[in-house]
Amino acid sequence: MRMYDLIYTKKLGGALSPEQIAFWVKGAADGSIPDEQSASLLMAICWRGMSTEETLALTLAMRDSGKRLDLSSVPGLKVDKHSTGGVGDKTTLILGPIVAACGVPCPMFSGRGLGHTGGTVDKFAAIPGLKVELSEAEFVRSLAETRFANSAQTADIAPADKKLYALRDVTATVESIPLITASIMSKKLAGGADALVLDVKCGPTAFMKTLEDARALAQSMVDVGTAHGMQIRALITRMDAPLGWAIGNALEVMESVEILRGEHGDSELAQMSFRLAAEMLIMGGAAKTLTEAQAKVQACIQDGSALETLRRFVTLNGGDARALDDFTRLPQAGQVVEIRAEQAGTLAAIDGRALGILAMDLGAGRRDRNDILDLGVGIRVHATVGSKIEKNDLLFTVYAKRETLVASSPYLKTIEVINVPAPEVPWLLDAIGC
Ligand code: URA
């Protein structure tokens, strides 16, 4: 088999066979196929797409490039969640402990942040001492003892994805529905969960900018999961303004804990986290209807068992659970800078991407894979879209290492009050699957 022929076939819009796809994935992972040939094929896939059969074959080949986790020693249906990523998205920190507290085991592998969106692993890393790279044995122990496990992806889960994702990252080939599907679903299928709830983000700050594309990605992932016997359901949610008041790792831990304490219950972040958790409870067999599931979610917030589950997870994995009750134990930033409204009006939009880039520049996220993070820096968003603003009202508090970083940021210019009220769009745009 020649890699040249695969590239040529896809360049002309033809279909690749499962054998050809397996040949490519194996060669990309073991280095026998040079990066320039993989990059060419990736670009051809971006332009020409892949059929459902090809996407399935790509997912399987990537899944089988590494190990599959065996979680069968932990009783019950294991339910995972995946979000395609957004600024301020800390739903895993909230819903993981909720789902576990309601009796459903919740195994989750998460990513580190790259670019303007943060990564769940970095948020957990802000809890002092917490081990965020668990061995397989530690992961299973955490799941068995607390019903919640979260770890950075281990190197032996879908290693072909790691290799291909790094290539996609530098060749502008990330935004492709079959490539995103295979990348996410190969890791999810290898991760050992029985069921999966997807949060597919849609909007200017997300991979999928239009509802049509978000639906196509959701359907593609649902098709692949279903074909492999996984229970799978996708919610499509709006992503434009940052999710919640916190952007930045320690700040996002604080906001998550506040929600688990029962605060900000009406916020979009809380509503979205509760709904995703309720979907997971239904899949895990802990509730029959959405109403029953939502009541269980509320009960474990009210009785404190969700927060207690997070404390147990943190303690078991070496973290200082006192930081969840005393936020001064979390990493702190040196400088606090307030950004106030320069004019009165209605806040029509908050540019999540601009704030995400500012947070990255402050050190909360990585521009480059090897960047070292500053876990205490970030942004507190005080205003919500649609609210009335008076001149000098506090819009954002920026927590930085050095004040000059904030003053010199070109992105602050984009986060002024705009006087034209935007139409209200609900956060839940659609649901697909199950
Ligand atoms: N997240 C992934 O893991 N893979 C993609 O391709 C996109 C987002």
Image (tube, helix red, strand yellow):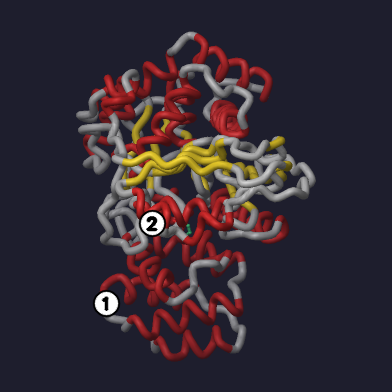
Label drawn at residue 361: 2
What residue sits 46% from the left and 52% below the top? 117
Q: Amino acid at mark 2?
A: Asp
Residue 395 lies, in percent from the top left, at 56, 40
Q: Is residue 280 left or right of residue 304?
A: right
* Residue at position x 33%, y 64% in the image: 368
The quarter of the rendered structure image containing the C terminus is top right
The quarter in which the N terminus is drawn is bottom left
Dot 1 falls on a residue whose secondary structure is loop
Residue at the spot of label 1: 31
Residue 98 visible in image: yes
Percent of width and height locating residue 128:
24, 32
Q: Residue flagged by tag 1: what amino acid is it?
A: Gly
Q: Is residue 204 left or right of residue 182?
A: right
9 w.r.t. 298: above or below: below
Which residue is at the front of the view, 37 or 327? 327
> How many neighbours does mark 1 have within 10 angstroms: few (below 14), some (14-19), or many (20 or more)?
few
Residue 333 against residue 74 in the figure, above or below = below
Report helix, strand or loop for mark 2: helix
Q: Residue at x 64, y 43 (%)?
A: 235
- Taking the spot 59% from the left edge, 22% from the top edge, the residue there is 265
How far apart marks 1 and 2 lie (CA) works out to: 34 Å
Whichever of callouts 1 and 2 sits on the residue coming sooner in the sequence is: 1
Q: Quadrant of residue 55?
A: bottom right
